[in-house]
Amino acid sequence: MKALKIDHIGIAVKDLEKALEFYEALGMKADGTEVVEEQKVKVAFLPTGDSEIELLESTSEDGPIARHIEKKGEGIQHLALRVENIEEAIADLMEKGVRMIDQKPRYGAGGAKIAFVHPKSTNGILLELTER
Ligand code: ZN
């Protein structure tokens, strides 16, 4: 596998509309919001240069973003690297002994295919692989 670039940085927020006001004050503009039912989140992507910032608000009290905010507060929740072929990337990493949260890609915002790598294998960060 090859990591092509930092695709986006995911930030857990309590109130997406309020967070958007701040990021738009920085001159960024979201293309609207999207609810990803599977992950119980409402997201907005803010392109900046070659990468994006993803703001994530939980749509449920037991979703991963709600749990993140409960444990650690708002803030950076994950880093996403773009890959060319996510199935190949997962297989390659597993062969190298990397611990995956997702052994099969799942649906991400904007129709992307995503998979998370376990923080035990990434020096403590939640790493998302993204194929667009
Ligand atoms: Zn993400």
Image: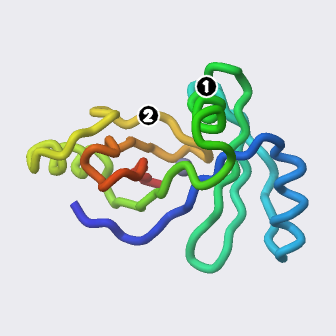
Relative to 71, does residue 61 appear above or below in the rendering? above
Give residue 121's position: percent from left, percent from top.
Answer: 25, 48
SS label for mark 1: loop
Q: Whole-Å distance between the Cαs marked 2 and 1?
A: 16 Å
Instruction: Kindly state the secondary structure of the residue where label 2 is placed.
Output: strand
Q: Nearer the viewer, residue 96 or 91?
A: 96
User: Which one is in front, 74 or 40?
Assistant: 74
Tell me the residue that label 1 is attached to. Answer: 63
Furthest toward the bottom, the residue is 49
Three-letter amino acid code of the residue under disc 1: Gly
| Mark 2 lies on residue | 106
Residue that appears at 62% across and 19% down: 62
Q: Quadrant of residue 53?
A: bottom right
Tag nearer the camera, 2 or 1: 1
The image shows residue 75 at horizontal and vertical percentages of 64, 53
Q: Residue at x 68, y 68 (%)?
A: 47
Q: Is residue 128 left or right of residue 57?
A: left
Check disc 2 and give the amino acid type. Arg
Q: Nearer the viewer, residue 28 or 123?
A: 123
Task: Depth check: give the residue in front, 74 or 89.
Answer: 74
Instruction: Locate residue 37: give its quadrant.
Output: top right
| Left or right side of 125 for 90 | left
In the image: residue 99, left or right of residue 60: left
- Residue 55 percent location from the top left of the image: 70, 51
Q: State the residue at coordinates (65%, 30%).
A: 66
Classed neighbour count for the residue bearing mark 1: other residues with Cα under 10 Å, few (<14), some (14–19), many (≥20): some
